[in-house]
Amino acid sequence: WIGGDKKEPSIVTGFYDPLQEKLRHTPGIQSVGMATIRPFTSSHFTLDIWPADQPAPPKKDIVGAAARASNADYFRTMGIAVTSGRGFQETDHAGAPLVAVVNQAFVRRILNGREPLGLRLKWDDDNKALTATIVGTIADIHQDSVRAGSAPEIYFNLEQLLAGQDMYSILAGFHMDIVVRTRLAPDSAFRAIRDAVHQLNPNLAFAEQTTMQQVVEDSL
């Protein structure tokens, strides 16, 4: 992953969007995904969330969801199936109503099996009631490890997070995992990503570069 530059007014439009374009036009790279937390990462931001047409449940009864932000191509790049509705798209821009994609565990455990598409969700952020509408569901994946079961997850569109918002600072302003689907050898892909990043901002730091195969093996 790479560390975020918090001096950038909006690192999404100022850095991540141009980086996606650079990498998409790199020979051998087929698709580019970005997400705040990739699979087999132990760190989470948990959001207490519930259907907006219901009163907030007692604190002890709330089932939290692991909240993440991703770009439109993340699910395709990672091979995560969209099981109903849709993923993110260009119409989900900053200023448009906030949308979300949830996994099947979210539907089972937080929605109690209700039809998720079109359902508005609500959460309390420093006493400000915020909402988002579910536009799609995805298959459950192993998030913490190969052996761990799937927990409820909710994804927000990276493009809809604005600098200055609490959700931006938590989900977009801290760090970002970049994933690519590529025909290149790993070393060549790593070099292409590093070059693209440093062309845009030579001050950003890399913490790790690895293949998903290695990530899975390390989880076993």
Image (spheres, grey):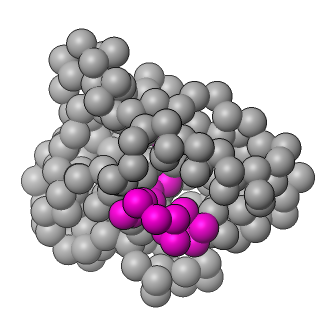
Q: Residue furthest right?
A: 7
Question: Picture coordinates of residue 108 (x, y %)?
Answer: 14, 46
Viewer-nearest residue: 23 or 144? 23
Residue 198 coordinates in the image, percent (x, y): 76, 50
**Residue 142 is at least partly visible in this image:** yes
**Is 26 one of the magenta-colored residues?**
yes
Q: Is residue 194 magenta?
A: no
Q: Position of residue 87 (x, y in %)?
A: 31, 70
Residue at (19, 17) in percent of width and height: 147
Residue at image point 19% right, 26% down: 149
Q: Residue at point 43% right, 38% down? A: 186
Image quarter (top left, top right, bottom left or bottom right) of the C terminus: top left
Give the residues drawn in magenta, as a range.
21-37
Q: Is residue 187 left or right of residue 217?
A: right
Q: Is residue 125 above or below residue 156?
A: above
Which residue is nearer to you in this view: 211 or 56?
211
Q: Tell me which corner region of the image, top left, top right, bottom left or bottom right, holds residue 153.
A: top left
Tell me, yes or no, if residue 59 can be seen here.
no
